[in-house]
Image: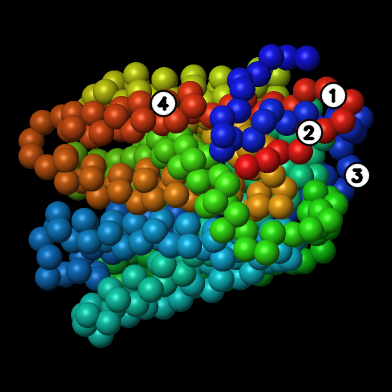
Amino acid sequence: MRKTDPPNQTDPPHRTDPLPPTAPPSLPRLVAASLAGTAIEFYDFFVYGTAAALVLGPLFFPTFSPLAGTLAAFATFGVGFVARPLGSVVFGHIGDRRGRRPVLIASLLLTGLATVAVGCVPTYESIGIAAPLLLLVLRFLQGFGLGGEWGGAVLLTAEHAPAERRALWASFPQIGPAVGFLLANGIMLALSALLTDAQFAAWGWRVPFWAAGVLAVAGLALRTSLAESPDFLRLSEHARVPLAEVVRGHWRLVLLTAGALAVGYAVFYAVTTWSLAYGVERLGVSRTVMLACIMAAVVVKGALTPLAAMLGDRYGRRPLCLIGCTAIALWMFPMIALLSTGQPLLMFSGFLVAMLAFITMFAVIAAYLPELYEPRVRCTGAAVGYNLGGVLGGALTPIVATAVAQGDGTPWGVAAYLSGIALLSLGCFALLPETRPVRAVEPVAATG
């Protein structure tokens, strides 16, 4: 048996799941539905971030200066991240009490409706202060729905998957964010190329939000016939109040996972959201060029996600997370230097290495987090830890980076900020146990 790190008082012991010989016959279809739904929900989330970087400032905060308008737009962007842990608590409770499957349907419906509604909000010029307030409420609902999405989609896949290939199968929903980002920005890119600036500001930016309604209907059609998780069905007793059990028995684990995941969010949104606004507004690079550079890096990241997950099945979850954090800490200064050139090939190179370091960690997270929690509170614990990391890393990064990057010259402060988060996450991962399943006669139940 492979030697593993000893658990502490709040971490579960190393799990030793038996190894089924093959994946269940329904697993490919389940993975496809989870990936499609995750892609759709992250499309909803990302299209707002792109719009915030490009047009929402002048349309909804016209009395602000250009910098203040961008900061205000990013603040509404951040509200979605604040809502995600709240959504993970509510949907996690449903997932641990009623099953993972209902979470997938309810979260997709809520996020889709909120996104379509964003595309219908009149601008400040039409209804005054009510416009940004409506934007704020709808962004909150987007984040609330997304807070339930990740836990439901990942757990349903991970709990169906064979133990020796759990990271691989669970990584496919992790491709969903890349697909959603490409869909959102692909539509934005096409509209930017086809429309004039005036047309794009008048109505073009709304089209991607309206398209979310069609995507949500397609996602619901895929998810309505999915089977419930076998781990949930095997439970003889369900947690009465899952959040209370998580806070009481797993509080340290939640804080460590949130801190560990913060760097992934920070780097992803620094590349996909802050750098887009910085390149267009400060460097004078066209919207089309910036979107193309970012999208190309995300394509490679998405394509290599299963490969990184296979390495996680072979060598363990924590080693890949430690490698990814270290790579991010070392790469942030070169990435900012390459971005500051304004040259497409150099900017793409900087983004690409950052995305590869990011996916080295996040390809295995979908298997790692569920393995850290016992099944009766897994939906709540894993989802809350994952989404708290989003608040620490994703909500603040565009705002902090925009503020730090003021003035002339290369924004080294942004690089220092991102490297600092990487070191924080590295320390958190170092304190977490390894969970890669090993062969055993009988499984050992995880405890708080």
Element assignment for label 2: loop
Neighbor class of circle 1 (other Cα within 10 Å; few <14, some 14-19, many 20+) is: few
Say few, some or many: other residues with alpha carbon within 10 Å of mark 2 (under 14 / 14 to 19 / 20 or more): few
Residues at discs 2 and 4 in contact (Cβ within 8 Å): no
* Quadrant position of the N terminus in the picture: top right
- Camera-nearest label, 2 or 3: 2
Specify the amino acid type for callout 4: Gly
Mark 1 touches mark 2? (CB < 8 Å): yes
Instruction: Answer whether residue 26 is visible to the viewer in this image.
Output: yes
Q: Residue at x 53, y 40 (%)?
A: 253
Which of the image's four quarters has the C terminus? top right
Residue linked to disc 2: 444
**Residue that appears at 83% across and 22% down:** 439
* Image-quadrant location for residue 162: top right
Q: Which residue extends farthest left?
A: 407
Q: Amino acid at mark 3?
A: Pro
